[in-house]
Image (spheres, rainbow, N blue to C red):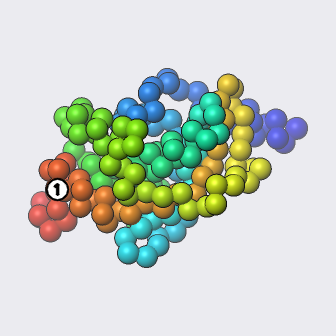
Amino acid sequence: MKKFSICLIVVLLSVSSVKAQSDPANYNYEVQFLRTGLEGTELFKVYAYCKKERDCFEYAKMDAVKAIVFKGIPGSGMQRPMVTEVGAEDKYRDFFKEFFKEGGKYLNYVAISNDGSIAEDDRLKVGKKLKIGVIVSVQKANLRKELEAAGIVKKLDAGF
């Protein structure tokens, strides 16, 4: 009964419009902050939704970067997103489309931190999709430098 209730809650919470995974405005994922690492890295557990398990690993990497850039991560030093400009997703759509394409530059700032194995409680069937929890590390400092160089975010020392 408890598993059924949990699955029902997950299904109800995950009902949303489906967009292409590479769309920068796609927020069909969940991110849980784990800890801050060395040299400007952050460690997250990302719950990605996909049809095939192997795709979830790639989506989790992309989703972790998207979360830092567009959403922010509750409970971390990244509560606010890096990109705070209203309408930035549309204004810089060409940049983000290229950045998040398959094999895109976002891969320079992210890595899977577990060995590729998934704990049983991190694998759920949600409708016709899988919800897989993957541990991901993101090089937050280097990612910020990339976005600063592209003129998308202001440098931290730029003032207000």
Q: What amino acid type should be assigned to the residue bearing mark 1?
A: Ala
Name the residue: 19% across, 56% down. Answer: 148
Name the residue: 54% across, 57% down. Answer: 112
Q: Quadrant of the C terminus?
A: bottom left
Name the residue: 23% across, 53% down. Answer: 147
The correct choice, above or below, for 97 with respect to 122 in the image is above
Image coordinates for residue 93, horizontal then vertical, percent: 24, 34
The correct choice, above or below, for 160 with respect to 129 in the image is below
The correct choice, above or below, for 64 with respect to 22 in the image is below
Total marks shown come to 1
Q: Residues within 10 Å of mark 1 (few under 14, many from 20)?
A: few
Asked whether residue 52 is in view, the answer is yes
Image coordinates for residue 46, horizontal then vertical, percent: 55, 50
Q: Which residue is mark 1?
A: 149
Image coordinates for residue 12, horizontal then vertical, percent: 65, 30
Name the residue: 64% across, 60% down. Answer: 115
Residue sitting nearer the eye, 110 or 156: 110
20 to the left or right of 149: right
Asked whether residue 12 is in view, the answer is no
Image coordinates for residue 4, horizontal then vertical, percent: 82, 35
Residue sitting nearer the eye, 96 or 35: 96
Q: Quadrant of the N terminus?
A: top right
